[in-house]
Image (cartoon, rainbow, N blue to C red):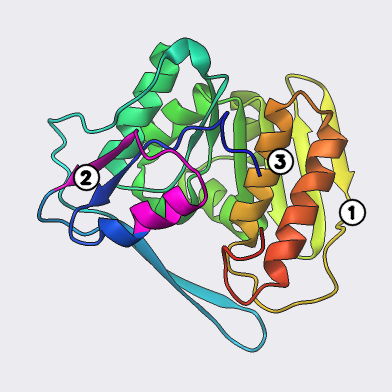
């Protein structure tokens, strides 16, 4: 995959950054927008999968981030067409959100493992400034209950809601654009481990979208990438 058109903006703890940096560089992914924090470990997730493919995730965010400081390094805002807000320390998510909002960059809101940490006010603020919200069906149901929203309310706030559901169809809906489409899964028949499939789907979908492809082609490519991940015993070894 060609990563030349993508920037990874993040923070790593200096105590365990070496392996991450070397791995990213081996994939020819630029690390120039990664900030190292001395005396700290990086955010990490521990995911356990049972024989029924049910999963339990423990997400530990980097806690060395001072809310009164700015840590993230960005390129020229004019070069960015899309910003993906992914799970991290909440202060970093807010910093990235404000950069994208203030520079009128289309936002993909991917709350992931930090879904419960936003609080209703911040969650709604990010939604109101996002073009896309992407989550799985279980996370959607939890978000609606947690933040006292109905699905119709959600659709009236954010442009597009993208909902994945394991081996079931992907649903993309927008009230603003009068759009609703259900996409039947085209996943690999080889099932090894579902860890990382959601991330693979997002990567395939939004990389394709940034290339100007139609929605159905974006989903097709996203499903293909997720299928490769599903059939791999190592989360990032399918490329």
Frontmost residue, 161 versus 151: 161
- Residue holding disc 3: 205
| Marked residue nearer the N-terminal end (2 or 3) | 2
Frontmost of labels 3 and 1 is: 3
SS under mark 3: helix
The residue at 87%/58% (across/down) is 186
- Residue holding disc 1: 184
State the separation of the CA atoms marked 3 and 1.
Answer: 15 Å
| Position of residue 184 measured from the top left corner of the image (x, y, whole percent) | 89, 54
SS under mark 1: loop
Frontmost of labels 2 and 3 is: 2
Q: Describe residue 214's horizontal placement relative to residue 76 as left or right.
A: right
- Residue holding disc 2: 36
Disc 2 + disc 3, Cβ < 8 Å: no
User: In this picture, which residue range is highlighted in magenta?
Assistant: 20-37
State the separation of the CA atoms marked 1 and 2.
Answer: 42 Å
Locate the N terminus and report the quarter of the image it occupies. Answer: top right
SS under mark 2: strand
| Position of residue 95 measured from the top left corner of the image (x, y, whole percent) | 30, 29
């Amino acid at each position: 995959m060609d990563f030349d058109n993508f920037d990874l903006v993040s923070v790593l703890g200096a105590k365990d950054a070496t392996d991450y940096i070397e791995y990213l560089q081996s994939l020819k992914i630029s690390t120039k927008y990664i900030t190292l924090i001395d005396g700290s470990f990086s955010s990490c997730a521990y995911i356990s999968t049972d024989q029924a493919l049910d999963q339990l995730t423990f997400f530990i965010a980097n806690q060395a981030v001072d809310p009164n400081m700015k840590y993230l390094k960005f390129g020229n805002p004019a070069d960015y067409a899309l910003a993906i807000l992914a799970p991290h320390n909440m202060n970093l998510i807010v910093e990235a959100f404000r950069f994208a909002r203030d520079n009128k960059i289309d936002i993909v809101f991917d709350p992931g493992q930090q879904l419960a940490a936003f609080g209703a006010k911040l969650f709604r603020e990010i939604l109101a400034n996002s073009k896309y919200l992407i989550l799985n069906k279980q996370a959607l149901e939890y978000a609606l209950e947690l933040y006292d929203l109905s699905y119709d309310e959600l659709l009236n706030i954010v442009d597009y809601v993208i909902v994945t559901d394991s081996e079931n169809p992907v649903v993309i809906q927008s009230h603003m654009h009068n759009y609703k489409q259900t996409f039947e899964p085209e996943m690999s028949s080889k099932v090894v481990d579902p860890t990382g499939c959601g991330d693979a789907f997002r990567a395939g979908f939004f990389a394709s979208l940034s290339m100007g492809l139609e929605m159905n082609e974006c989903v097709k490519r996203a499903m293909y990438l997720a299928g490769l991940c599903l059939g791999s015993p190592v989360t990032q070894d399918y490329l």
